[in-house]
Amino acid sequence: MKPELRELGLTTRGFMPEDEGMALYEAALSSNHDSKNNSPLLEIGSYCGKSSIYIGAAAAELNKTLFCIDHHRGSEENQAGWEYHEPDLVDKETGQLDTLPHFRKTIAKANLENTIVAIVGDSIQVANNWNTFLSFLFIDGGHGTKPAHNDYDAWTPYIEVEGTLCIHDVFENPKDGGRPPYEIYCRALESKMFQEISATGSLRVLKRIAR
Ligand code: SAH
Ligand code: MG
């Protein structure tokens, strides 16, 4: 990965430790199982663009497009009074959380504006209007039971065989964090349609082996 992008990944705010970000980059890079195939990469949950840098860096090298979906209003745990609330991300006029300006700045700084297409909206609403196979899917949106399982149900059918599924915040031990990302990781394995490739911190990289 280009050193300047690696540096930007480190300094951009968000929730992606460097080792997991690098694993994400490697996973995205090796998602190019068929070089004649031009299917895009997609991220659910971008926040300020920290993880988008790692996936975007790979997408740029592959000459592919990365779609980044986020309504930019934050998840439950980002709202006022919750654990991951950052007050300076609140738009003073609307009183709502707004990470879109930060995301946009990150992508511009990363020089990835020709690689990344932002989709601002609800991931399920987008999925209901989606019709394109994906070579790579990263799930890091809402971490509650419904949002996580809905993202799994709505988006994993679009991953092509040999394509890559990455899930963030997978904690085998309940003491380390919430269950839903772990539950959808288990669903993927139990479906027998995915095989685990690697685990780095709370990041799980899976490959689609059947449909
Ligand atoms: N990947 C980011 C962190 C994502 S935090 C990083 O590397 O820092 C989770 C994000 O998911 C939040 O920005 C939130 O706005 C978004 N999100 C939650 N539910 C969503 C939904 N239903 N549709 C779109 N985005 C959603
Ligand atoms: Mg995460």
Image: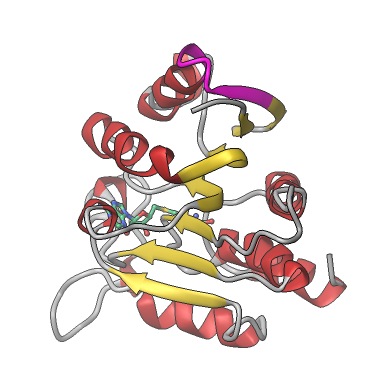
Total numbered badges shown on the rendered structure: 0
Task: Please tell me which residue lies in front, 35 or 62.
Answer: 35
Image quarter for ligand 1 equals bottom left
- In this rendering, position of residue 150 left or right of residue 114: left
In this view, which residue lies farthest toward the front? 36
- Image quarter (top left, top right, bottom left or bottom right) of the N terminus: bottom right
Residue at x 59%, y 85% (from the top left corner): 114
Let me know if residue 115 is in the magenta part. Answer: no
Residue 138 placement (x, y as % from top left): 52, 48
Whether residue 99 appears in this view of the structure is: no
Residue at x 24%, y 60% (from the top left corner): 129
Whether residue 164 appears in this view of the structure is: yes
Residue at x 29%, y 73% (from the top left corner): 98
Residue 137 placement (x, y as % from top left): 52, 48
- In this rendering, position of residue 88 left or right of residue 161: left
In which image quadrant can residue 95 be found?
bottom left
- In this rendering, position of residue 169 left or right of residue 180: right
- Compared to residue 74, the image places residue 143 above or below, namely above
Task: Please tell me which residue lies in front, 43 or 38.
Answer: 38
Residue 68 placement (x, y as % from top left): 45, 65
Instruction: Please report the bounds of the magenta region as a residue range.
Output: 189-196
Task: Please tell me which residue lies in front, 207 or 121.
Answer: 207
In this view, which residue lies farthest toward the left? 94
In which image quadrant can residue 165 be found?
top right
Residue 157 placement (x, y as % from top left): 40, 38
Residue at x 15%, y 86% (from the top left corner): 93
